[in-house]
């Protein structure tokens, strides 16, 4: 038990170390959530653009139609 308490005390620097760990974890969680939201928004926008645009034929089908 004392080894755990010594680890958590961080040699007397716990007041500086643990808040830094907490802040770093909070920033990483925020970045993950923000990235996921942005990805979902961009995917929805892409689907809306695809649905709104007319269908294009493939290059081979265009060449056949032109001949």
Image (cartoon, rainbow, N blue to C red):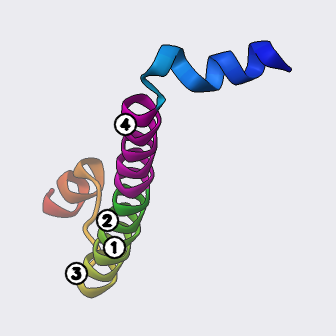
Q: Quadrant of residue 20?
A: top left
Along the polypeptide, which appears first: circle 4 or circle 3? 4
Residue located at (18% from left, 52% from top): 63
Work out which residue is located at the far left of the displayed protein and give it.
66
Would you name the residue on which mark 4 appears?
A: 20
Please identify the quadrant where the N terminus is shown. Answer: top right
Of residue 60 and residue 14, the one placed in the foreground of this image is: 14
Q: Secondary structure at mark 4?
A: helix
Work out which residue is located at the far bottom of the displayed protein and give it.
52
Would you name the residue on which mark 2 appears?
A: 38
Q: Position of residue 59 (x, y in %)?
A: 23, 50
Would you name the residue on which mark 1 appears?
A: 41
Density class for disc 2 (Cα within 10 Å; few <14, some 14-19, many ≥20) is few
Give the Cα separation between the discs numbered 1 and 2. Answer: 5 Å
Give the Cα separation between the discs numbered 4 and 1. Answer: 31 Å
Along the polypeptide, which appears first: circle 2 or circle 4? 4
Numbered disc in front, either 1 or 3: 1
Residue 66's place in the image compared with 31, above or below, is: below
Give the Cα separation between the discs numbered 1 and 3. Answer: 18 Å
Residue located at (45% from left, 52% from top): 29
Would you name the residue on which mark 3 appears?
A: 53
In the image, residue 25 lies in the stretch drawn in magenta: yes
């Amino acid at each position: 038990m004392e080894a755990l308490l010594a680890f958590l005390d961080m040699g007397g620097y716990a007041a500086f170390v643990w808040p830094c760990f907490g802040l770093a974890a909070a920033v990483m969680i925020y970045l993950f959530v923000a990235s996921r939201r942005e990805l979902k928004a961009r995917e929805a926008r892409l689907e809306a653009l695809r649905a709104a645009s007319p269908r294009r034929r493939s290059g081979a089908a265009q060449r056949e139609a032109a001949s």
